[in-house]
Image (cartoon, rainbow, N blue to C red):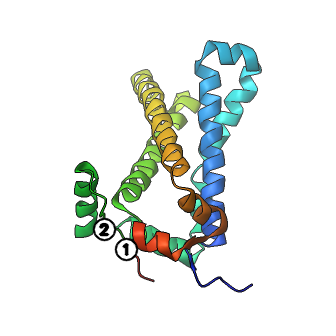
C-alpha cells in the first residue's frame, strides 16, 4: 500500500496494539474499581467475587502489553524519546503556562512525557499495593492498611488522569487518527511537533 505524500508515519502497528490493550486493561481496572467501591454500582452489577477477580487480573496483566511491545524496535525508540527531557520540553511547559501557541516539541511534547512517566509510576505503585491486599499473609496489618489507603486514593487520581487523557484526545482528532491508523498529516506534525525528526 502506498503512503499518501501528505501523511507521515507516527506509530507502528505494535505501538498501537500496546496502547489499545493497555487502555482496555486500565479501563477494566477503573470500571471494576468503581463497581467495588460505589454501592449503587455494586448492587446493579452484583457478582462481587467475579468483579474482584476481573479487577485483580486486569491489574496484574497491566504491564504485559508494554513488556511484550519491547520486542518492537519502534516502541523502544519511542520509550527512549519519552524518557528524555530536554531544553525544548521546559520551553513547551512555560509556553503552556503562559498560554502561548508556539510550543516546541519533538515527537512527544513535555505533557505527553510527564503523563507517560506518571502513569508508569502509578501502575507500579498500584500493582505493589494491590499485591499486598491480594496476598494479606505477605505483610503485617499496618502495611496492608497503608497499602489499602494508598491504593484507594491513588485510584481516584489515576481515574482523573485517565479522564484528562481522554479529554485531551477528544480535542485532537488528528492525534486520534495517528493512534488509530499510525499516520498523521504532515501539516499537523509540523504545527504540533515542529522538532520531530526521524
Residue at x 39% of width, y 54% of height: 117
Mark 1 sits on what residue? 194
Residue 178, image x and y in percent? 58, 65
Residue 158, image x and y in percent? 47, 38
On the rendered image, what quadrant is the C terminus found in?
Answer: bottom left
Asked whether, in this view, residue 56 is left or right of residue 122, the answer is: right
Residue at x 55% of width, y 48% of height: 170
On the rendered image, what quadrant is the N terminus found in?
Answer: bottom right
Q: Are marks 1 and 2 in contact (CB under 8 Å)?
A: yes
| Helix, strand or loop under label 2 | loop
How crowded pointer 1 is (Cα within 10 Å; few <14, some 14-19, many 20+) is rated as some
Along the line of sight, the residue nearer the viewer: 111 or 145: 111
Q: Is residue 68 above or below residue 44?
A: below
Residue at x 57% of width, y 80% of height: 6
Asked whether, in this view, residue 91 is left or right of residue 111, the answer is: left
Residue 25 found in image quarter: top right
For marks 1 and 2, give the CA distance: 6 Å
Along the line of sight, the residue nearer the viewer: 23 or 6: 6
Residue 3, image x and y in percent? 66, 83
Residue 33, image x and y in percent? 60, 28
| Helix, strand or loop under label 1 | loop
Is residue 176 something that shows in the picture?
A: yes
How many callouts does the rendering have?
Answer: 2
Mark 2 sits on what residue? 104
Q: Is residue 61 above or below residue 30?
A: below
Is residue 128 something that shows in the picture?
A: no
Amino acid at each position: 500500500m502506498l503512503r499518501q505524500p501528505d501523511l507521515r508515519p507516527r506509530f507502528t502497528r505494535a505501538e498501537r496494539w500496546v496502547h489499545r490493550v493497555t487502555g482496555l486493561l486500565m479501563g477494566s481496572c477503573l470500571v471494576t474499581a468503581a463497581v467495588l467501591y460505589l454501592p449503587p454500582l455494586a448492587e446493579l452489577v452484583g457478582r462481587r467475587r467475579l468483579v474482584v477477580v476481573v479487577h485483580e487480573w486486569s491489574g496484574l496483566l497491566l504491564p504485559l502489553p508494554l513488556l511484550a511491545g519491547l520486542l518492537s524496535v519502534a516502541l523502544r525508540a519511542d520509550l527512549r524519546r519519552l524518557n528524555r527531557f530536554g531544553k525544548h520540553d521546559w520551553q513547551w511547559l512555560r509556553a503552556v503556562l503562559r498560554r502561548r501557541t508556539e510550543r516546541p516539541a519533538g515527537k512527544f511534547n513535555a505533557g505527553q512525557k510527564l503523563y507517560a512517566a506518571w502513569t508508569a509510576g502509578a501502575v507500579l505503585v498500584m500493582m505493589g499495593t494491590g499485591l499486598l491486599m491480594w496476598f494479606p499473609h505477605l505483610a503485617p496489618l499496618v502495611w496492608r492498611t497503608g497499602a489499602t489507603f494508598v491504593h484507594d486514593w491513588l485510584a481516584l487520581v489515576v481515574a482523573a488522569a485517565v479522564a484528562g487523557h481522554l479529554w485531551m484526545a477528544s480535542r485532537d482528532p488528528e492525534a486520534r487518527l495517528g493512534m488509530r491508523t499510525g499516520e498523521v498529516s504532515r501539516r499537523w506534525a509540523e504545527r504540533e511537533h515542529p522538532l520531530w525528526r526521524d
